[in-house]
Amino acid sequence: MAKAIPKNFPRTLHKFCRWHIMNKHKDPMKKLYKLFPDLKDQLTAILNHPLMPSEFEDAWKALIEKYNLHDINVMINLWAERKLWISAYWKEVFCARMTSTQRSESMNFVLKRGFVTERDNLHIFAKQVNNCVQARHEAENAEANASTGTRKTVTRYGFEAQVMDKYTRAVYSVFRERQYHSTAFRIKTSQDNSNNYLVHHYNQSKEFAWSRHEFRVLADEAEGRYECECKLWEHTGLFCHHVIAVFEHLRLDEIPSKYILQRYTKDAVTNPDFNRRDYRTTTEDGTSIEYIRTILYSEAVKIINKGCSSEAKFQIALSAFRDANSRLDNEDAELENNEDAEMENNEQSSNQDNTTRETGSQNDIPQAENNDPYADIQPPLVAITKGSKTTDAARKNGKCKPPVPARPEPELDEYGRPKGTRICGTCNKIDGHNSRTCKARQLAKKLLETHEKVYGPTASSGNIKVRIRNLLAR
């Protein structure tokens, strides 16, 4: 993909999905999180918050320095691929909030989290998938019913009433949540330009670089220009906390229309060619099945309500339903008979064509000795069961020793000669060193010292050594 995409799509920017990057290194990262409990929160803060490339690199180096992770392979690999999956390096690129394969992955997550497991049988899997689809339909119906009600703004600002009227319900919820968090920022006017504002978080923690940073926001009401150096609007098309804080500071009445993208508004799709809800759900003449089902359901409910009023009306409604069901069955049977007759006519016409095309006598055609079409088919090969049943049973019962692992190949020097003959007991490699001089052992010692420096000496140092050994295991 890395070679094909620039060639065939020269204007497309190819980046890695963050979820897949972290999932690829899931096992070693779990070991690191278990060794350093605070590492996960600090790493997540560095990845999530709007940092510029230089600030991200400084925060990353500070994190590596704090926990002494210079020689950990997973951190080296994440740093080497940073420009392909860290959003700080492509803030200017518009991605419409699509920084991962989120649609398919989110549905996979929903299905695996609440409906199916790896041990489910096929019939249970099919049943649970149907339950998942029905649950999603119910959620969409609930959202549709909620969207018909009236919404109220949190504040009296004119710009909030504007976005509530323009944005969809989901996008407005995102805007309102950011507006809530924007109250945690403080604003001061820049001395260089009155249209420039410096926005910073009130809790300037020393742990994270993002909380100490002052974001410069340009707000020119005369020209209708609003920009922030975090470039979140250029990246996603939605305003960041800093710009919203400036909106509240200026008591802005209306946001320029160029900043409200049509893709996030209620009029995003005007006169569509087709509705995705009707995809593959139409009859042969093109009529929507959802439309037909709605009309029939409405009429059936009317008959049911009238039939429940008295016994006579009940008999009339019941006979009407049975008569309609019988007529529909007759219609299905007639269609099936027509299809069978059409197939028979096609077979007869094809046989007549084959008969007329035959030329020459039957003696000129070589006859096979055996007319059985399956005569040349041989039975499948029988696979021999791998392993010995006796040995496997003995190994399970503990009466047989496990197989000896294969001896590793020695490392070669620049002249192609083996570096040694002894196997290191720590890294299980032949590299001219032993367990006392192994680099993995020296790294384990540094990690233990770092853990004691961050968390202090603990009584369970043995458990910490086991976690370090598991982290460095090949």
Image (cartoon, helix red, strand yellow):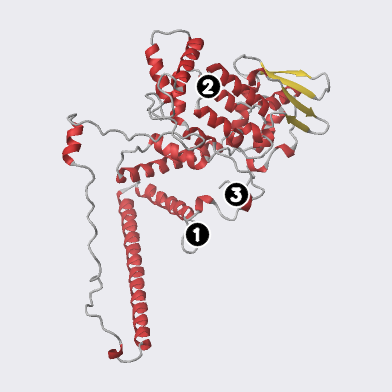
User: Which mark is on residue 287?
Assistant: 1
> Which residue position holds label 3?
5
- Judge from the rendering whether residue 9 lies leftward or rightward of residue 410; answer left or right: right
Q: Is residue 91 left or right of residue 457?
A: right
Which residue has dot 2 on it? 69
User: At 40% across and 37% down in the image, what residue appears?
Assistant: 112
Give whichever of discs 3 and 1 has the lower sequence position. 3
Image coordinates of residue 175 in percent, x first then y, are 63, 30
- Circle 3: element type: helix
Going by the numbered disc 2, the residue's amino acid type is Leu
Residue shown at 36% from the left, 88% from the top: 356
CA gap between label 1 and label 2 equals 63 Å
Is the residue under label 3 in contact with that under label 2 (CB below 8 Å)? no
Element carrying mark 1: loop
Can you tell which quarter of the image residue 265 is in?
A: top right
Q: Position of residue 120 (x, y in %)?
A: 31, 40
